Amino acid sequence: MAQINTKDKEKYPQPMAFPVMIFWTGLFGGVFWGTMGYLAYFLHFIDIRPNVILLPLALGNWKYGWIGTIVSIIIIGIISIGVAFIYSALLKRFNGLWFGIGYGIVLFAIVFVLLHPLFPDIKPLFELKRDTFITMMCLYMLYGLFIGYSISYEYQNKKVQEKEAAT
């Protein structure tokens, strides 16, 4: 592989810092998969809309409309930033798809078992309709896969680049 001299390096954009990449991965993952959750609700695959995150708060009736949906998806994106940083702190060293999928399953369990009392409008886990349960589990697994694989890939890529730069 040809070496790039310092003058040529200035022409190429610098890669994002790893924490910045985690931030954007978390935000995009939360907004994208929150939107997919709304689409699943709209298509009647699930009975839970993203607005459920606003229901415990006494904010007015706007939280039930389209503004509430958009605000809910943005809040899910913001929460997802923290979820991405937690994944990075705990599991970024592990390579492969299964750690991200497992992380999604753990997040599903946390939301539907541990945090269930915060959301009284959601039925208990084993009282959910089968379509809702399966679709939500799949959405959480895909979300975990997205977060996990993106962060692990970038971490492994960064390690290879640092190793090449050192030699």
Image (cartoon, grey):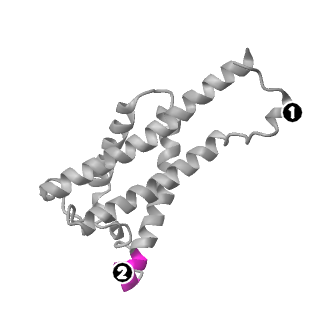
Find the residue positioned furthest to the bottom. Answer: 61
Q: Is residue 125 left or right of residue 139?
A: left
Magenta residues, as a range? Answer: 60-68
Inspect the magenta stretch and tell me whether residue 107 lies in it: no
Report helix, strand or loop for mark 2.
Answer: loop
Q: Residue at x 42, y 81 (%)?
A: 59
| Residue depicted at x 68% and y 19% | 164
Going from N to C along the chain, the mark reached first, 1 or 2, is 1
Q: Toward which corner of the image does residue 33 lie, by quadrant?
A: bottom left
Residue holding disc 1? 7
Q: Amino acid at mark 2?
A: Gly
Q: Could you say where residue 9 lies in the image, as x and y percent from the top left?
A: 80, 34
Q: Nearer the viewer, residue 26 or 58?
A: 26
Residue depicted at 42% across the width and 43% down the height: 146
Instruction: Kindly tell me whether residue 28 is visible in this rendering.
Output: yes
In the rendered image, the vertical position of residue 10 relative to residue 81, given as above or below: above
Q: Mark 2 Cα within 10 Å, few/some/many (few <14, many 20+)?
A: few
Q: Position of residue 6 (x, y in %)?
A: 85, 30
Residue 63 is a magenta residue: yes
Q: Which mark is residue 65?
A: 2
Q: Distance of mark 1 from mark 2, alpha carbons?
A: 54 Å
Camera-nearest label, 1 or 2: 1
On screen, residue 44 versus residue 11, left or right, reads left
Instruction: Identify which residue, 10 or 165, lies in the foreground.
Output: 10
**Secondary structure beneath disc 1?**
helix
Magenta span main SS: helix
Horizontal and vertical percent position of residue 114? 30, 52
